[in-house]
Image (cartoon, grey):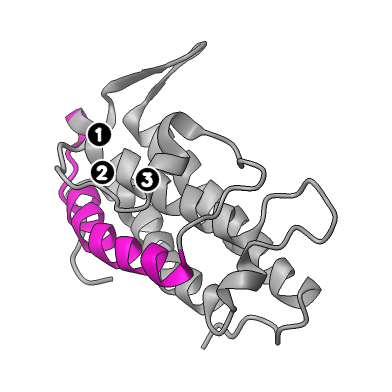
Amino acid sequence: MKTQPTSNRMYGIIVLYEMQTDFLKKALDGIDDADAQKRLDTKANHISWITGSVVSGRYYLAKSFGVDASSSTGELFKDNKGIVDNATYPTLAEFKKDWDKISPLLQEALTNATEEKLNEKIEMPGMEMTLFDMISFTSYREANCIGQIALWRRLLGYAAMNYM
């Protein structure tokens, strides 16, 4: 961990955040852009959509901290939009560029989050939660999505994800 967080509650979250920041790029390593948009005759979300939704999630969370940054690939993911059949998604390089842009900004915000900030209420359609709850959910979801990409790697004939 680069810096001790202001809130002790954030320690584990930030450890996971740093790991997942690296793991997403490792999961995408070597995947061809055409393969990233294959659904293999299923209705499953493809690698491009999964990646874009994770990137979009970090930008959304950053806005909760007042970080003024926008993704160059965000329109297909606006308002938590699901996968769009027959859409051409951005390249993995574009997603990685957005990921590299938002990740340090959000990490700084997470590290400096006060208890008061973490306890702020967030209203979403049909539910209310604290910002800390949203951060926790986002961390869980990122790990889940990275695992999905790791599975897609194997289904598409790529070597297993390298964690090192």
Determine whether the residue tagged by mark 2 lies in a helix, strand or loop: helix
Identify the residue under disc 2: 62
Question: Tags 1 and 2 in contact by the CB under 8 Å rule?
Answer: yes
Q: Is residue 115 magenta?
A: yes
Question: Distance of mark 3 from mark 2, alpha carbons?
Answer: 14 Å
Quarter occupied by the N terminus? bottom left
Q: Amino acid at mark 2?
A: Ala
In which quadrant of the rendered view does residue 104 lie?
bottom left
In the picture, measured across the screen, residue 73 lies left or right of residue 157, that is left
Q: Amino acid at mark 3?
A: Gly
Vertical arrangement, residue 92 with respect to residue 117, above or below:
below
In front here: 2 or 156?
156
- Sort mark 1 into few (<14), some (14-19) or many (20+) by Cα contacts within 10 Å: some
In the picture, measured across the screen, residue 86 lies left or right of residue 90, that is right
Mark closer to the observer (3, 2): 3
Mark closer to the observer (3, 1): 3
Vertical arrangement, residue 103 with respect to residue 45, above or below:
below
In front here: 158 or 120?
158
In which quadrant of the rendered view does residue 38 lie?
bottom right
Identify the residue under disc 1: 64
User: Where is residue 56 shown, x and y percent of the image?
Assistant: 40, 46
Q: Which residues are magenta?
A: 91-116
Question: Distance of mark 3 from mark 1, alpha carbons?
Answer: 16 Å
Identify the residue under disc 3: 74
Question: Distance of mark 1 from mark 2, alpha carbons?
Answer: 5 Å
